[in-house]
Image: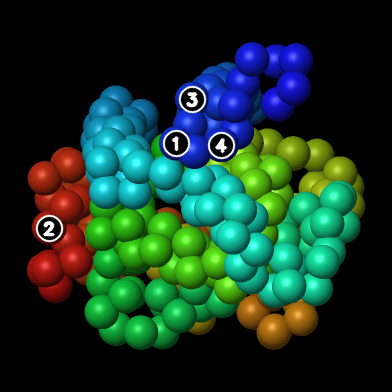
Amino acid sequence: MPGTGVTLWGGLPGEVLIRFGVFAAVFVAIAVWEACAPRRCLAVGRGRRWPHNLGILVLDAALVRVIFPTAAVGIAAIAAAHGWGLLNLVGLSGWSSVMLSVVLLDLALYGQHVVFHVAGPLWRLHRMHHADLDFDVTTGVRFHPLEILLSLAIKIAVILVIGAPVLGVLIFEVLLNATSMFNHGNVRIPRGFEHALRWFVVTPEMHRVHHSIVRAETDSNVGFNLPWWDWLFGTYRSHPEAGQDAMTIGIPQFRDPAELRIDRLLTQPFRDE
């Protein structure tokens, strides 16, 4: 970015700095918000969950950097340099290209998420995210490493197909990290404001339904950033049947708190109990 000393190209001190800075700021903000105004009482608590959830995050980040060193933003730079992708072919550029790419990437993420819920082998990977016994900011960063790598490969394919510009991909990546932590936050939001907010972004009240132990509710409210796809494709559910306070978080197979350990998390896709 001119005048900042931060580069957005290649493999990428600028990207890392921006993404880590926003991630750290949002994580701390949500964690403080949870401590000051929690929405629900935690069943297990931070001490037994956070070291393992954050350990998974560190492992995910390390694997991505080793296996996909340029990551999504670098792929967007390569696509732009070669004129690959639909947006490049039609000559769309500027902010219209940036914003359209963010929306299209979010739609692709919604579609991927739906498939991960209905395809058996993919659900086995994704269910580790749902097996958390509580719902807070660290749930939003708890994904199996194999799911992370597969998701990144899918994202790279989508970027190449649509020709998403570098800035659009960077904005999407930053938003995805931030909104994943926000919509998993165990935070209390005034009801009227929350109802207005869910017109524009997936809120914790909306996404918490997705972490219900009731499978029909687990398969609802699939979006991460934008709520519109759930309305458009019929996966929206306004509230859990048991209510936000009484609903049970998690999935039936892994209710033992021992399953919260990082070694057990990594083997969950290969076990049924």
What number is the disc on residue 9? 4
Marks 3, 2: nearer the viewer: 3
Name the amino acid type tagged 1: Gly
Q: Is residue 149 above or below residue 140?
A: below
Q: Residue at x 28, y 36 (%)?
A: 62
Q: In this view of the protein, can residue 202 be seen by the observer?
A: no
Residue identified by numbered label 2: 267
Query: Is 232 left or right of 117, judged from the image as shown?
Result: right
Q: Nearer the viewer, residue 238 or 119?
A: 119
Residue identified by numbered label 3: 13
- Disc 3 to disc 2, how far (Cα)? 33 Å
Name the amino acid type tagged 3: Pro
Q: Considering the image in quadrants, where does the N terminus appear?
A: top right
- Disc 3 to disc 1, how far (Cα)? 7 Å
- Disc 1 to disc 4, how far (Cα)? 6 Å
Whether pointer 1 and pointer 4 mark residues with C-beta atoms closer than 8 Å, the reply is: no
Q: Nearer the viewer, residue 66 or 38?
A: 66
Dot 4, crowdedness within 10 Å: few (<14), some or many (≥20)? some
Name the amino acid type tagged 4: Trp
Q: Position of residue 98 (x, y in %)?
A: 78, 53
First in sequence: mark 3 vs mark 2: 3
